[in-house]
Image (cartoon, rainbow, N blue to C red):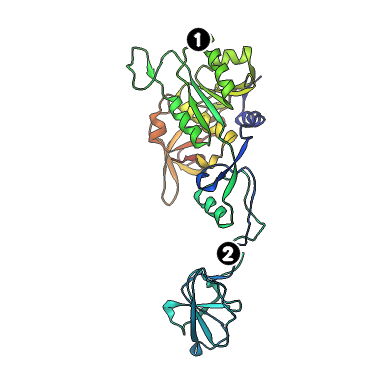
Amino acid sequence: MEEKVTISRALEILQTYPILSHTEIIPIHVAHNRILAEDIFSLVDNPPFDNSSIDGWAVLSSNDPKKRIETNPIFAGDLPPPLLQENQAIRIMTGAPVPPNADALVMVEDGIHGPAHSNFIRKKGENIEKGEIALSKNSILTPAALALIASIGHASVSVFSKPKISIIPTGNELVSPGEKLEPGQIYESNSISLAALVSRAGGAPTISQPIDDDIDSTRKKLDECAESSDLILSSGGVSMGDHDFIRKLLIEEGEPLFWKVGMKPGGPPIFGLWKGTPILGLPGNPVSSHIVFLTLVVPWISHPDLFYRKIKVNLQTTLKGSPNKTTFRRIKIHSGDEITATSQTHQGSGNIVSMVANDAISVLPPNTNGEINDIIDALWLID
């Protein structure tokens, strides 16, 4: 087992255990935000024929505008018209095929004798040609991407199957929301955020009831999840405490691969295999759990563009870095002539309010503080 690895090394290890390995073919109308499993090639030229981008007249630019004579109109969906004859101006509607020899269009607003424009003709294949790659494997199927796929003739698409991901919250202090809190207890929230993050990532989450800090209960739960899941995400139980049984079991009875990552918050995640199923143990603090998911899980099982934009910001708040660790502080983006950032809350890893009051995360390199007017890297989170 490797200890105190860098973020890049942790990702290298994770990528050797791919979660997105199975594929399925689904109709495009249910494929929003899924991840493409293979290149998509155009089945047709787009546009499939030369057509008009305006309402007006199709003409020969060499003819005298004053001598144009209007002929029968052509509409979108009509068969291609015959060749234009000398001085003919065929009335044409948006989307209609232009005559084969027409080289210009006149806008209806300008009248039949108005100026001719060659750039109003949409040329066959000018957007994409038949056989050309329209979208590459691993692309996100956004609304625009789905429209493109439909426009080139595909009714279905091959995507990565949704991985089954079990989420296990651990801790004697945890109580499900809605129940009465007793002294020393807190409401369990990590499974809620993790399930939402897993869903956005394209996975199918299953939330377990919080398990007590008991080694036998933890072992039993890991066994159950290993049989039914492609990945196990646990929350808590990974640090150095006497009751951190996720770490203890994975090291003593599983196949541990790395423990502790050079990042703050979120330093103690542990990764390995439990009976052949990958398990990533996340910290129990809610901010730490969230940021480890964004930093390690998203690039591993999903696509970062679903979660954040990488940007540069002019820092207007001092931020404390960390020795030998990449530091992720919560910041608020302000858009204007320049993108600036401030911090709206304290940076405690248990302060989930900070993930709501702010909308981005700083990326401070190891041994680096953020000073006012520094230009720093940041992840602008997508709601």
Other-residue count near label 2 (Cα within 10 Å), few / some / many at <14 / 14–19 / ≥20: some
Say which amino acid is labelled 2: Pro
Query: Horizontal and vertical percent for residue 112?
Result: 46, 83
Residue 277 is left or right of residue 282, and the answer is right
Residue at left 61%, top 67%? 124
Tell me if residue 81 comes above or below residue 113 in the rendering.
Answer: above
Q: Which residue is mark 2?
A: 47
Tell me if residue 364 comes above or below residue 66 in the rendering.
Answer: above
Let me know if residue 333 appears in the view: yes
Say which element carries label 2: loop
Q: In terms of sequence position, does the residue under pointer 1 or pointer 2 come before the other? A: 2
Query: Horizontal and vertical percent for residue 315?
Result: 46, 40
Q: Which residue is mark 1?
A: 214
Query: Horizontal and vertical percent for residue 297?
Result: 56, 31
Residue at left 63%, top 29%? 14
The residue furthest front is 79
Say which element carries label 1: loop
